[in-house]
Every structure is written in structure tokens, then in C-alpha cells.
Image (tube, helix red, strand yellow):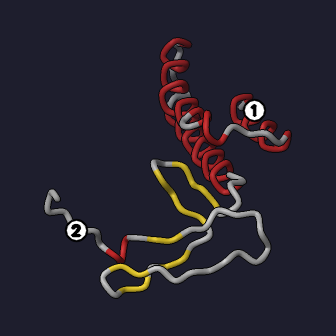
Amino acid sequence: MNGMQANPSKCKVITYTRKHEPIRFEYSMDSAMLQRVNSIKDLGITLDSKLKFNEHISKTIAKANSMLGFLRRNTADFDDIYALKALYCSLVRSGLEYGVQIWAPYRGVHELRIENVQKR
């Protein structure tokens, strides 16, 4: 209605199921077949076909560790603890907490990995 057109090359198909042999249907848009994927990123959260969030948690932890390393390298001469806390909360912790209401870790191993980032 507003004149926008969907780009079939940017559209993907994902099926959420726990079945071993899910029903597969081929979807098309403007006579182009849509690509079927096992995981997809939507609003910064990676969803897989079984809604396990393992991939999302691994990527989030890797990004937080990377940012924490960046902060440690570049703030070695900082004396103000409040400045360090502000940088940590805005750059590391905010990434760890983004969308946690959706992907909250329910397995102990994921909780430990996230806590290890915070302990560092």
C-alpha cells in the first residue's frame, strides 16, 4: 500500500520445530525461491530452528570478551574507577544484557561463561 517492495534475495525461510523430519515446503516470492536457513538474526538476536540460542550466546560472549580486551588495552593508565565502571557498563555489560528477556541462559554452562566475562 505504501509502495515498498520486498527484496526476495534478502528474504529467508526458517521453520521452528522439534521434529526430526519437519515438513518442508518451498516458498517463493516474485517467482524466486526463498533460501531456507537453520538460524536467522532478527533485531540483534540469533534464532535457530530449535530456539536453543546456543549460537547467539556464543556470539554475545565472544563480542563481550573482545570489547573487554579492547577496554583493558586502552584504559591501562586510567585511575578513575568511576570512568572504568561507566565504560564497562556501556560497552560490555549492555551487550551482555541486550535481549536477555528472550534468550536468558537456562543452562549452567552458559551462565558460567557469561559470569566469567563479568569476573574478568
100 or 110: which is nearer to us? 100
Q: Position of residue 47 (x, y in %)?
A: 60, 56
Given the current orientation, which residue lies at the most extreme right position? 108
Q: In the displayed structure, does residue 98 sit left or right of residue 108?
A: left
Quarter of the image holding residue 111?
A: top right
Residue in the image at 62% along x and 52% along y: 59
Instruction: Tell me if residue 85 comes above or below residue 98 in the rendering.
Output: above
Q: Which mark is residue 62?
A: none
Q: Position of residue 39 (x, y in %)?
A: 59, 64
Quarter of the figure with the C terminus: top right
Q: Which mark is residue 5?
A: 2
Quarter of the image holding residue 4?
A: bottom left
* Residue indicated by mark 1: 115
Q: Secondary structure at mark 1?
A: helix
The amino acid on which the numbered mark 1 sits, given as a three-letter code, is Glu
Q: In the displayed structure, does residue 95 sit left or right of residue 17?
A: left
Residue in the image at 48% along x and 53% along y: 42
Q: Position of residue 66 (x, y in %)?
A: 58, 46
Q: In the displayed structure, does residue 114 sit left or right of residue 8?
A: right
Instruction: Tell me if residue 105 comes above or below residue 53 in the rendering.
Output: above
The residues bearing labels 2 and 1 have C-alpha atoms spaced at a distance of: 44 Å
